[in-house]
Image (spheres, rainbow, N blue to C red):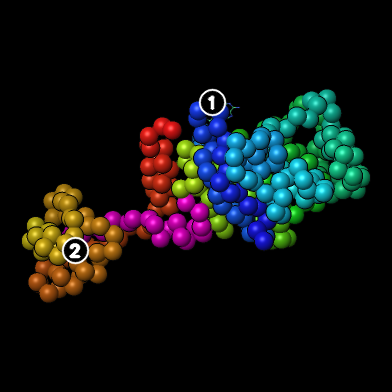
Amino acid sequence: MPVITIEGLTKRYGDRAVVDRLGFTVEQGSLVGFLGPNGAGKTTTLRMLLGLVRPTSGRALVYGRPYRELADPARAVGAVVETMTAHPRRTARHHLRMLGIRVGVGARRVDAVLGLVGLTDAADRRAGGFSLGMRQRLALAAALLGDPGVLVLDEPANGLDPEGIHWLRGFLRSQAAEGRTVLVSSHQLAEVQHTVDQVVIVAGGRLVAAGSLDDLRSRASGRVHVRSPEAERLAGLLAAAGATVRPAGPGRLEAPPGWAEHIGLLSAEHRIPLFELREDAPDLEEVFFRLTRTAEDREPR
Ligand SMILES: Nc1ncnc2c1ncn2[C@@H]1O[C@H](COP(=O)(O)OP(=O)(O)OP(=O)(O)O)[C@@H](O)[C@H]1O
């Protein structure tokens, strides 16, 4: 059974569906990036998953149940879905101790989570003086209090500096390595592409892609670049073979992906010298933009 199941999930505000018949699953122990541009409906989806927003229709389940029906939600799911609301005059340790009472954990667990997020040295400082990065770490510490099997994190990298983002990547990987299931949202593919195993991409409230990063890479369209002193003759031969080629400057052509071998063979057969024949590496970012842009350009609902 998947740990997280989203089925036909829809949220309407007025006549606008901000989440529109969304469906995907997250398997035990996987680290999944939940991606989409700003306004794609990520936060709304995560809030429905956590029982904070009521779906208009469809279901969002954790371990096969709505979050609110879980026997011990704080120990099942740790979440960071909004900016921390630690009292500014309270120390990090005090804040976590208060939350710990609700979760049913004591001082030892509080010290452990402070260590896990690298806040041990700042534990007795007031949260009001914390940087955004420290506040993010404190929110993560709070999510970890109940030692949950699932982590749901909404844009945890927001506002982090490069060092903080580097730390976060290691943190997420270590959580997954310990067998936790992690669903982490971001509006930037680059932010998570070296961390996650799987991606779920949404735009305009709808699913546009779900799968591994390799699946996504296979959808990338690297152009084939050709340079030849007989570019024009080659272009004619390629057009006759069914390729849509276009001139790309003097003695240069661009052909669609997948044509590199064909071009090599054709030019050998017709004794056309090639000075360059190169296919772009798949560009994940380009796939992400293409998928999300197409979805956002659709007619308004
Ligand atoms: N309570 C609400 N009432 C009306 N519209 C809302 C409400 N909550 C969210 N929306 C709208 O739903 C859309 C999706 O918002 P959501 O915050 O889920 O997107 P997101 O993908 O998390 O984007 P971001 O990265 O900017 O947070 C936005 O256009 C937002 O304005």
Asked if the residue at label 1 sits under 8 Å from ligand 1, the reply is yes
Q: What element carries label 2?
A: loop
The mark found on residue 14 in the picture is 1
* Crowd band around label 1 with a 10 angstrom C-alpha radius: few (<14), some (14–19), many (20+): few
Q: Write down the quadrant of residue 30 in the picture.
A: bottom right
Mark 2, residue position: 275
Three-letter amino acid code of the residue under disc 2: Phe
For the record, the magenta segment spans 209-228
What is the quadrant of the C terminus in the image? top left
In the rendered image, the vertical position of residue 4 relative to residue 143, given as above or below: below
What is the quadrant of the N terminus in the image? bottom right
Quarter of the render that holds ligand 1: top right
Q: Which residue is drawn at 90% across and 39% down?
A: 101
**Count of numbered badges drawn on the protein:** 2
* Crowd band around label 2 with a 10 angstrom C-alpha radius: few (<14), some (14–19), many (20+): few
* Residue 283 screen position, x and y as percent: 39, 53
| Residue 115 in sight here | no
